[in-house]
Image (spheres, grey):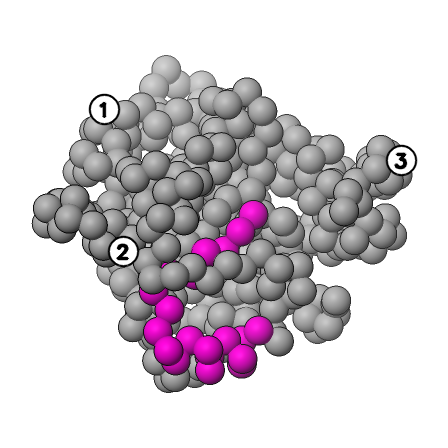
Amino acid sequence: MDYCDPESIDQMISFTEKLDERLKKCFEILHQGYPKETLERFLKARDGNVCKANKMLLDTLNWRVENDIDNILARPIEPIEVYTSVRDSQLIGLSGYCKQGRPVFALGVGLSAYDKASADEYVQSHIQMNEYRDRVLLPMMSQKFGTYIGPCLKVLDMTGLKLSALSRIKILTMISTVDDLNYPEKTEIYYIVNAPHIFSACWKVVKPLLQERTRRKIQVLQGSGRDELLKVMSYDSLPHFVKQQGSSSSRRNEGKISSCFSFDHSFHQEVYAYMKNQADTGKPNGFISKLNSFHVQVPDETHEENLEGSNVIVRTIKNTLKGMGDEETALENGVAELHVSNDQLNQS
C-alpha cells in the first residue's frame, strides 16, 4: 500500500519549515539532499498518518541533537584496541552492493558475543555504521545510479547460534529500538541464512520484540541462501559465509575469501580512516581550511576481492572532501549519555 500521497508529503514539508534553525540544520544532515524521500520514509513508518509521522520525525531530530549524532562520525571508539575488540565481537561488514545499487551488509548474528566492550560502545558503533551508510555510501550510490537509493539489504548469518544468545537480548533490543525509532525504512529486506534448529526457539523470543513492519521484511532462506541471493546480487557481493558454502568454485577459492567482518577488511579500514580524519580536523561537520593542504589517512592494506588499493584511496579522499562544509562547533556529549527515552520505547 502506498502511504505517501503528495498532500501528506506537502503537510510534512510545511511542518519542517516551521522547525527552529537548529532542528532545520539537523534535518539537512539527516536527509542528505533528499528531503522528500526522507519524509516518505517517516510517513511510511507511521502507515501514512501525518501527525504520527511528524512526531516521529521531531523525536528523531531531538534525539540527534541531544546525543550529538551529527558529529558521531568524529568520535571514533578509542583506543584502537577497544575498537578492534568491538569489531571482533559485533560482527558486521559491507560485502558489496545488490544489482539495484543498495549496500549489502552482512551480520554474524550467531557468533557476535557483545562481550568485549560496554553496551554504549556497541550502540555507538552501530550508529556510526548507520551514519556512514547514510552520509557516504547511499549518496555515492545514488549519484552513481542517477536515482535516489535509500535502503540497504542485510544478510544475517546464524552460524553458531545457541540458546545462550538470548542473554544478549537487552543490547540487541537497544540497537533495534534505535533503528526502529530513528532510522525507519532504511533496510529493505533481512535475509536469514545458515539457521540451525535452535533458531526456531530463539525466534519465538525475539519476534515479539520487533516492530510488525520489521517482521514483514524478514526472509529465512534455505541453508546459506546462495541461489536466492544470487538473484539480487552478483557473486562478488555475496558475504564470505555464503561463498564458503556449497559449490566447488567456492571451495577452490576458500583460502582466498576474506571475512568482511575483519577490521583489516577494506570497508572497515575506510570507515575508521574517515572517522579519524573527522576527529583530527576538529570540525566534524566540516570546514574549508584556509591552508592549501589537508591530511587524509588511508588504509595500509586492501583486499583485491573488494577494491584495488588505488580505488580505496580515491574513495577515502572523496569521503573526506564530502565531510567538509560549513563551520559548526562540535558538542562535547559522550556516547555514554546516549539514551532512548521511555516515551520512545513505548511508541508503537
Q: Is residue 98 visible?
A: yes
Residue position marked by numbered label 3 in the rendering: 7
Dot label at residue 241: 2
Q: Residues within 10 Å of mark 3 (few under 14, many from 20)?
A: few
**In the displayed structure, does residue 188 sit left or right of residue 65?**
left
Could you tell me residue 291's position as x and y percent? 39, 18
Q: Position of residue 259 (x, y in %)?
A: 23, 51
* Of residues 296 and 343, the one drawn nearer to the viewer in this rendering: 343
Q: Residue drawn 58% across and 38% down?
A: 150
Q: Which residue is mark 1?
A: 310
Mark 2 crowd level (few <14, some 14–19, many ≥20, 10 Å Cα) = many
Gap in Å between the C-alphas at discs 1 and 2?
Answer: 27 Å
Between discs 1 and 2, the one toward the N terminus: 2
134 sits left or right of 48 in the view: left
Dot 2: what SS? Answer: helix
Going from N to C along the chain, the mark reached first, 3 or 1, is 3
Q: Secondary structure at mark 1?
A: helix
Q: Amino acid at mark 3?
A: Glu
The spot of residue 113 in percent (x, y) is 33, 73
Q: Answer left or right for 270 relative to 146.
A: left
From this view, report whether residue 75 is shown above or below residue 215.
above
- Residue 294 in percent (x, y) is at 34, 24
User: Do the numbered discs 3 and 2 sit on residues whose CB atoms are within 8 Å?
Assistant: no
Amino acid type, callout 2? Phe
User: In the image, which residues are magenta?
Assistant: 188-207
